[in-house]
């Protein structure tokens, strides 16, 4: 019987284990040396005092030789020895959080790809806010602080990578409250920011021209919590990243922006000034090249490409319907999502986009039910009653799973899910058409941002006349997918795995049927779903 060659994965594991063991040996040698050195020094002193000078000098020489044979390791060498890159960041939608499929976040995803390219594991060190993150960096608890705003003061103490994204600091107030025109209008109001934050630095600079400007540095609340405090009326104002404001407005639509404070600022990775040049050089090389790739565009779109879809009324209506309706159907969304390998909140988001969870919704084209199934689709799925919310949810879940599985294997997640949603809206034939158009125009038919850019072309005769399946309301499909992504994000934020209570006075979906009186209260939706 012949021998089988070891795989590349096995070889990599052996090398990693050998490096770890070698590092352990070096570390243990240093510990032994640190333990023995004072004791040897004490013995030398005793020998010298008893006139054994030659012996003392001989032993001293050995100690010096051993000491010089324990070389100090550079930061990058320690990273390679431990096979781990430690990044310091804060919990939040701009940086790092735990999603349905594990750790994610814009900054985390970038750092993870950088670590993967060097064969490293990544370990996250969490801080309460940006100020604490920089303190942990200076204390040596990690090699990189990810997602740090570059400021002049920080530039005196830290080293930064090449800039990654640009943002603005915005003064945020609550709808119905007093809207200031400038910082000089805030002298009698409660303004809170994080201590040692870029916003505290901006206010310190502005106070030179506004001597009456007052603010509180709250060390117990991060930026998201401060925005929540504004939304609930606990404080009057805060400063926050413009991207975070847009995301948070979906959950707190009563948050309003008064004005931008200062000039736009760059966000980057931060290091201590003692950081070895090699780490910064490798990171800069990665960021400079990666920012021009399609993969970077996909990551940016994944986290920020849909945050402007919902308006104030949409968010308020969703919050009300989560409270009044979702408890009726949550267990059914969970059941059929699990059976079809879906996140139940994604399935619920599709149902909300289709009908606002109204089991008797109908359209002029005959699409009906909570998941808005056509008669042909219901027959195909063997769903006898489209107006039965449980059957409708089952059919919608099975159909969405089928669409996801039907797409070509080269389309990866999350683009795969977004394209399946577009197919749910337009039909599979139109997706085939737009993938061909996207390829003809130099885009990638496997990436949702490129598909999204080209979908409106299906409404232009000079483009749809060349396709097999013809005209389609492509602009509506873009809005459709964007809404579902936003609903999905909000539902993840608003709900947990525990079932919501069934609204008071309603015991089962049949009671909803009787209450709504379907023929008179059907929701009219002009949408060619499925």
Image: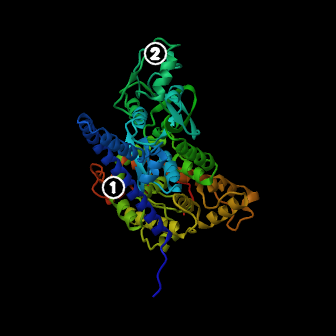
- Disc 2 is placed on an element classified as loop
Of marks 1 and 2, which one's residue comes earlier in the chain?
2
Quadrant occupied by the C terminus: bottom right
Q: To which quarter of the image does residue 328 belong?
A: bottom left
Nearer the observer, 43 or 504: 43
* Residue hosting label 1: 328
**34 sits left or right of 14 in the view:** left
- Which residue is situated farthest in the right direction here? 462
Q: Is residue 357 visible?
A: no
* Residue hosting label 2: 213
**136 sits left or right of 165 in the view:** left
**Vertical placement of residue 185 versus 177, above or below:** above
Residue 266's x, y, as percent? 57, 34
At 56% from the left and 62% from the top, the residue drawn is 423
Quadrant occupied by the N terminus: bottom left
Residue 60's x, y, as percent? 34, 41
């Amino acid at each position: 019987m012949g021998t089988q060659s070891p795989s590349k994965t096995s070889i990599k594991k052996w090398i990693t284990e050998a490096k770890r063991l070698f590092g352990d040996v070096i570390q243990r040698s240093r510990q032994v040396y640190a333990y023995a050195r004072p004791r040897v020094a004490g013995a030398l002193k005793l020998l010298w005092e008893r006139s054994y000078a030659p012996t003392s000098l001989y032993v001293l020489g050995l100690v010096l030789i051993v000491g010089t044979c324990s070389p100090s390791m550079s930061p990058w060498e320690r990273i390679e020895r431990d096979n781990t890159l430690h990044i310091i960041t804060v919990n939040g939608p701009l940086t790092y959080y735990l999603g349905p499929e594990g750790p994610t976040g814009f900054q985390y995803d970038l750092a993870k790809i950088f670590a993967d390219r060097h064969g490293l594991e990544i370990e996250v060190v969490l801080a309460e806010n940006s100020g604490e993150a920089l303190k942990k960096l200076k204390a040596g608890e990690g090699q990189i602080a990810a997602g740090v705003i570059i400021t002049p003061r920080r530039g005196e103490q830290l080293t930064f990578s090449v800039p990654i994204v640009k943002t603005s600091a915005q003064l945020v107030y609550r709808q119905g409250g007093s809207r200031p025109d400038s910082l000089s209008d805030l002298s009698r109001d409660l303004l809170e920011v994080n201590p040692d934050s870029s916003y505290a630095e901006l206010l310190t600079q502005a106070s030179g021209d506004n001597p009456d400007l007052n603010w509180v540095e709250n060390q117990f609340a991060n930026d998201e919590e401060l925005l929540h405090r504004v939304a609930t009326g606990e404080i009057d104002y805060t400063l926050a990243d413009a991207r975070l404001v847009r995301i948070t407005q979906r959950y707190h639509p009563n948050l309003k922006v008064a004005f931008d404070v200062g000039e736009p600022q760059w966000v980057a990775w931060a290091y201590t000034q003692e950081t070895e040049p090699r780490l910064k050089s490798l990171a800069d090389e990665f960021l400079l090249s990666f920012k021009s790739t399609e993969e970077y565009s996909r990551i940016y779109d994944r986290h920020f490409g849909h945050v402007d879809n919902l308006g104030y009324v949409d968010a308020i209506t969703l919050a009300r319907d989560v409270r009044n309706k979702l408890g009726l159907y949550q267990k059914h969304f969970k059941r059929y999502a699990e059976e079809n390998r879906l996140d139940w909140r994604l399935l619920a988001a599709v149902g909300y986009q289709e009908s606002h969870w109204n089991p008797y919704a109908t359209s002029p084209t005959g699409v009906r039910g909570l998941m808005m199934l056509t008669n042909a689709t219901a027959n195909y799925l063997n769903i006898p009653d489209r107006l039965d919310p449980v059957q409708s949810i089952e059919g919608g879940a099975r159909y969405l799973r089928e669409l996801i599985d039907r797409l070509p294997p080269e389309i990866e997640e999350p683009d795969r899910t977004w394209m399946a949603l577009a197919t749910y809206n337009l039909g599979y034939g139109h997706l085939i058409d737009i993938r061909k158009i996207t390829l003809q125009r130099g885009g990638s038919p496997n990436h949702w941002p490129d598909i999204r850019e080209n979908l409106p072309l299906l409404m232009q005769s000079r483009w749809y006349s060349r396709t097999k399946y013809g005209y389609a309301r492509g602009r509506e499909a873009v809005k459709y997918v964007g809404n579902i992504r936003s609903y999905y994000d909000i539902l993840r934020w608003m709900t947990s795995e525990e079932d919501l209570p069934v609204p008071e006075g309603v015991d089962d979906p049949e009671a909803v049927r009787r209450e709504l009186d379907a023929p008179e209260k059907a929701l009219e939706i002009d949408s060619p779903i499925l």
